[in-house]
Image (cartoon, grey):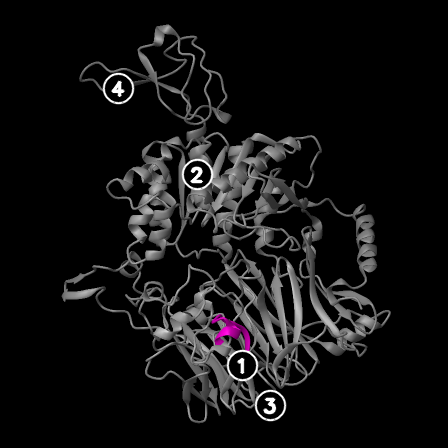
Amino acid sequence: MISCSGRIVALFMVAAIFARSHSLFAEPKHPFTVEESIKMTLFSDPYTRLRDAKCKESPDGQYFLVVTTRGSLRTNQLVSSLWVYSAVDVDSYLHKHEGHKPKALMLFQRAGFAVAQEFNSYGSLITDARWSRDSKSILFLVEQPDGHRHLCRVYLSDRRFIDLTPGNSDIEQFSEAGGTIAWVAVEHEPIPKLIGDPINQASSDLTGLSLFHILFPTTFPDPASFWPALDLWVRYKGVNRQVNAGGEWHFPRAATALRIAVSPDGRSLIAARAVQSIPTEWLKYKTASAAFSLLASHTGTDRSGRSVNWPWQYIYVNLDRMTVAPLVDAPSGIDTGYIDAPQAVWSPDDRFVLFTNSYLPLSKGSGRLQLLDAAACAAAIYDTADHVATCVVGARFPAQNEWLTSARFGATSNEVILQWSGEGTTETDTYARSVQGWNLEPQKASADESQPVICLFIKQGLNEPPTLWAAGHRADVAKELWNPNPQLASLQLGKASVYMWKDSTGYQWHAGLVLPPNYVKGHRYPLVIQTHGFYNEHEFLVDGSYTTGFAARALAASGIIVLQMEDRADRHVRPAQQEAHLAVDGFKSAIDRLDKDGLIDRSHVGIIGFSRTAWYVEEALIHDPHLFRAATLIDGIDQSYMTYMLFAPDNPEAAVEQETANGGKPFGAGLESWVRNAPGFNLDKVQVPIRIEALGRISVLGEWEVYSSLYLQGKPVDLIYIPNGQHILQNPQERYASQQGNVDWFRFWLQGYEDPDPTKRVQYRHWESWRNLACIIRERPASGDFARYKIAGEDAGSVKLRCGTWGRLCRHIPSGLRRFSAVAFPCAWLGQAEM
């Protein structure tokens, strides 16, 4: 049987041939721009960035839901919409020769400014949409103007919309079953009048607080934590109730990947709670590696649930009695390095709970202890009647490089189906209960799927914009349901491909390479390297790994080749001092390979560093000053001195990382190592113009060392401020300022191009002031006199000087001018003009 996402490949090929022949008679195409990227309609659910993304089918099989999001530069808003397709209409379209495309019904739409924190690009105002168990409504989270997400419901019959958690609620996740809804909400604490310990009405003691808590008490109101507390709520029998009433404990921050599991009858649920204490006996548990421990030195002492280090455990909540008890008297394995996905699943009869990545209580006898080797269970079963837990299978990681990704019951509660992942492969195992325990069953043949079944999925590729397709199991047929971006057919997109090369260490790199639309073989183009990830070679490559700064298609449309580089897979397991240097090796080897392949002009290369890769780019600019022509650093860390002094207090993990990268603490004898290694002490070596983007006020502090050092040295540096921008930019105008700003920046420095837009005139005059400065000769002053500056060529008559790139000294000074000494100033355009 052909899989859903791979049906009738021949049909796709025919469609492609037709499209190619049709293009011969099409109107002239226009270049792709940043604005085109922003206004694209993208699928938020199923998520465009996921491979093999499929629509969620209603439990009764009658409907599919789809969420889309687009941006509007004019209003600076995102517009998210919730749609529903009828399975009957889709089936008719699939299997009738002249069936018309079914239209989706829009149930709900929300337009607004994105405030809530997103952790990936192309965010949505509608998230976590799920069908109710009766298929009559859809539950989902809707972002409010204040950034809080409310749990809402919309009915299919009349589009009636209900906000189930009005007020100041901010929902992180929810579950529903048996008429009961459970959710985890952020507890927004009142802002203290004084930060720190009050001394009197005019002063306070800030000792031990971080800059985050001092400068941003609204965002970080709890001096003891960077994270707001999470509370567990239920809507049971029509009444909203807080499970952890009184705030004595909170839903653990470390367990946010665990989704609450409500029992089928709606009377119980499985959630998580920070353990009340760590018994000495628990130190017998086997951790995944020596880097993890249940000792206080690793866990800290914060038992409230706010800490991501303090261990947590599964809990069983009886909603009739509102009682809370540990599912098993043991911690989760997540805090000790096991990487199986945390999950809890009820059996259909409410009798058993399948839960993953947890230790089980240590046996006083030796039998069970030997069986489990005191390690975590990948999957275990809890009997709610007998109150006994048994391990189905132990964790495979780290002995094997495999981890559990999902778990569910089979046809009965005596059968468990587990899916594993590792080494780029997936595997599904079935375990059956017997008198002796749980046994791995032989692989079973696929279930009969001859009955009519429909699948809706996203089809896309590196060069193929995402479209929604339908496929049926009754026959090998697939058809396009919806192309949300027909305007892209009239745009020049260029060609993207997977590009591979090896660096000097033998490491195999992968990247996305985007060529200009009218690429001419043999012509050498400027290059921009975009760093920090190439995650899905099956995704339409439009911007790059993120929407902050990166603009792959827009740069390519301007005649610049773009390389979207992956992160080196072993970057976190090698010594910290090697991490950035290995990345620089990747940059250099990429340029060498592209140059060898005849694709680029290696003297016209730019690079963008974002977040952690800003550190890598700084290292490249310092240790190989002539590798790049221009660079951008965005909201980054660089393991440097000022970052350490600003953010290491009250952040021991960051402190240790920076100390390791620079060879110790930056005090006394250790400071010498920092002077050699930390970027901030070596910025005098930078010789290219740099654009720095600060996203929010804290980011200004983080970028200030690099900016102020370059500025005080008279080197070309721009500091761009996006005050409300989150780390991964979402709002249209913020994205435009960052992405289009980089298109303008690199076109200027790599191509000498200036956008004729009159609103950008000041920007270009500013950059020209750097570009067009001649090399300046400074006359040695007489005693007590100020230095006098003369322009070489004017005061030296017919003296001819060749100037290097930015920061190089003018050379070939004749003997008659030996009383002059050269000073580093930018030379004429491209740094090669003769004067």
Q: Which residues are magenta?
A: 369-381
Look at the numbered disc 3 and give the secondary structure of its residue.
Answer: loop
Residue marked by disc 4: 787
Mark nearer the N terminus (4 vs 3): 3
Q: Amino acid type of disc 1?
A: Thr
Quadrant position of the N terminus in the picture: bottom right
Residue marked by disc 3: 349
Residue closest to the eye, 750 or 251: 251
Mark nearer the N terminus (3 vs 2): 3
Left or right, residue 525 beside residue 228: right
Look at the numbered disc 2 and give the secondary structure of its residue.
Answer: helix
Mark 4 or 3, closer to the camera: 3
Mark nearer the N terminus (1 vs 2): 1
Question: Where's residue 646, x and y in %?
Answer: 30, 51
Q: CA distance from mark 4 to mark 1?
A: 83 Å
Within 10 Å of the Cα at label 1, are there few (<14), some (14-19), or many (20+) other Cα atoms?
A: some
Q: Amino acid type of disc 4?
A: Ala
Q: Amino acid type of disc 3?
A: Asp
Mark 1 or 2, closer to the camera: 1
Mark nearer the N terminus (4 vs 2): 2
Look at the numbered disc 4 and give the secondary structure of its residue.
Answer: loop
Left or right, residue 193 beside residue 584: left
Say which quarter of the image contains residue 117. bottom left
Left or right, residue 12 beside residue 652: right
Q: CA distance from mark 1 to mark 2?
A: 52 Å
Mark 1 or 3, closer to the camera: 1
Residue marked by disc 1: 390
Within 10 Å of the Cα at label 3, are there few (<14), some (14-19), or many (20+) other Cα atoms?
A: few
Residue marked by disc 2: 619
Q: CA distance from mark 3 to mark 2?
A: 59 Å
Say which quarter of the image contains residue 711. top left
The correct choice, above or below, for 505 with respect to 373 in the image is above
